[in-house]
Amino acid sequence: MIAKRFLLAVLLIYVGWLAFDYDYHFIDGVNLLFHEAGHVFLGFMGPTVHFLGGTIGQLFFPVACALHFVQSGKPYEARLMGIWFAESLMYTARYLGDAQAQALPLVGGHIHDWNWLLSRWGLLPNCESIATALHFVAVGIAVACLIAAWRWVESSEESFDSSSTESI
């Protein structure tokens, strides 16, 4: 349990950095890989799903991992996957917010997914506001997952303490 508490303390600092000063970093390389895979696997379903496919792909994997941990009876790990999901949403918010300016480098093409999508939906002028709202939602998810993981560790320690006291 000490290791889990230590990891949560480190993640608290990480989530704080994500919340207040998010920038592209190591985990986003993984998110980018899943993003591009989403285009490949969903590209046959028409242009809208193709352009959404990248974001769907990058969000799918943290959710799939969380579900795996839930089914495996590992709620602590599932909550950590929630933090990954939230971070991936922040990455999405960053990309979405760039839809009008298109300053971020693109991989494998010349079409910005969110520029294409928001243009068709008439929302391109609102891209930065939408991105900010999405970032706040992601911060809320990350904080909720941290709190849930911390509470799980505390309740597990209490269960361990009471079971070890009963056996004396």
Image (tube, rainbow, N blue to C red):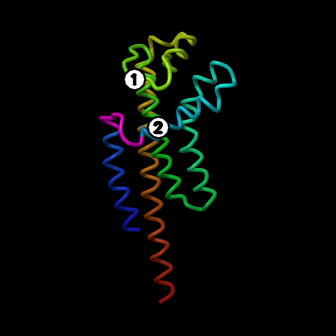
Q: CA distance from mark 2 to mark 1?
A: 17 Å
Q: Is residue 41 left or right of residue 88?
A: right
- Are circles 2 and 1 on residues that touch, CB within 8 Å? no
Quadrant hosting residue 132: top left
Is residue 22 part of the magenta span, yes or no? yes
Q: What kind of element bears circle 2?
A: helix
- State whether residue 160 is above or below residue 106: below
Q: Give the residue displayed 45% in from the left and 14% down from the top.
A: 126
Crowd class of label 2 (few under 14; some 14 to 19; many from 20; radius 10 Å): many
Instruction: Identify the image quadrant of the N terminus.
Output: bottom left
Residue 69 drawn above or below residue 52: below
Question: What amino acid is found at the position of numbered circle 1 in the picture?
Answer: Pro
Give the extent of the magenta segment: 19-27
**Mark seen at residue 88:** 2
Above or below, 161 against 148 in this view is below
Q: Helix, strand or loop at disc 1?
A: loop
Residue 95 % position (x, y): 43, 25
Callout 2, which amino acid? Answer: Ser
Q: Nearer the viewer, residue 12 or 167?
A: 12
| Residue at figure coordinates x 55%, y 17% from the top left | 117
| Front residue of 128 and 38 | 38
Residue at the disc numbered 1: 105
Q: Which residue is located at x 46 percent, y 49 percent?
A: 145
> Relative to residue 162, is residue 49 drawn left or right?
right
Image x and y of residue 140, in percent: 43, 39
> Is residue 103 found inside the magenta-colored segment of the image?
no
Q: Residue furthest bottom?
A: 168
| Residue that protrudes farthest toward the right in the picture | 45
How would you rate the neighbour count of disc 1 (Cα within 10 Å): few for under 14, some for 14-19, many for 20 or more? Answer: few
